[in-house]
Amino acid sequence: MSTATKQRSPKRGFTGWHMVAVMSLFFGTVISVNLVMAWNASRSWSGLVVENTYVASQQFNGKVAEGRAFQASGIKGRLTTEPGAIRYVLTRNGEPEQKIDKVIAVLKRPVEEHEDLRVELHPRGEGAFVLAEELKPGQWIAAMMAMAGDAVVHRQTIRFIAEGRDK
């Protein structure tokens, strides 16, 4: 009887090369996601909140006082949107405001500035002002300024969502 010894190949377990592959895939994924997110962030955010933070901090108390004066005047504004139009209605103590002759709106996106608009709404009676403008769907911020002659009598900032037209 002859006995032949069989040579077994050594079991290949988890080797150093496997670890290198796992680490490379993990960090490659993390770095790729970070690059994509950084690219999206740099394209969609202007990065500018105020031109000069020191000057803005000095103006803060004045803006708070102005806001309190507007609130004490009793004037309230309500913004409604529909496809193709923006409507802003001003009331004082529940009655339509008659003294305001002009409303200026600065419409802007929360994180982008290339779609910003500065427009004047047209009076439609009974304290209502309308803009026949089609806004792109999505979130908007409207900085509304109501004027009587050259004096600003009401200022309001409203965040809203513009709906798109049904296709």
Image (tube, rainbow, N blue to C red):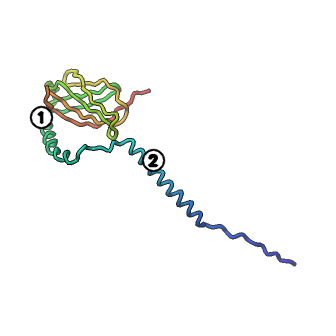
Q: Secondary structure at mark 1?
A: loop
Taking 163 as reference, is 80 left or right?
left
Q: Kindly indicate the quadrant of the structure image that contains residue 138.
A: top left
Quadrant of the drawing holding the N terminus? bottom right
Viewer-closest of 47 and 7? 47
**Residues at marks 2 and 1 touching, judged by CB atoms closer than 8 Å:** no
Is 100 positioned to the left or the right of 163 in the image?
left
10 Å neighbourhood of mark 1: few (<14), some, or many (≥20)? Answer: few
The percent coordinates of residue 65 (x first, y second) are: 13, 42
Considering the image in quadrants, where does the C terminus appear?
top left
Q: Which residue is mark 1?
A: 73
Q: Residue at x 29, y 33 (%)?
A: 107
Query: Residue 150: horizontal and vertical position, in percent?
Result: 14, 28
Q: Residue beneath label 2, please?
A: 36
Q: Residue at x 22, y 22 (%)?
A: 123
Give the quarter of the image for residue 69. top left
Q: Position of residue 79 (x, y in %)?
A: 26, 31
Secondary structure of the residue carrying numbered label 2: helix
Upstream in the sequence, badge 2 or badge 1?
Answer: 2
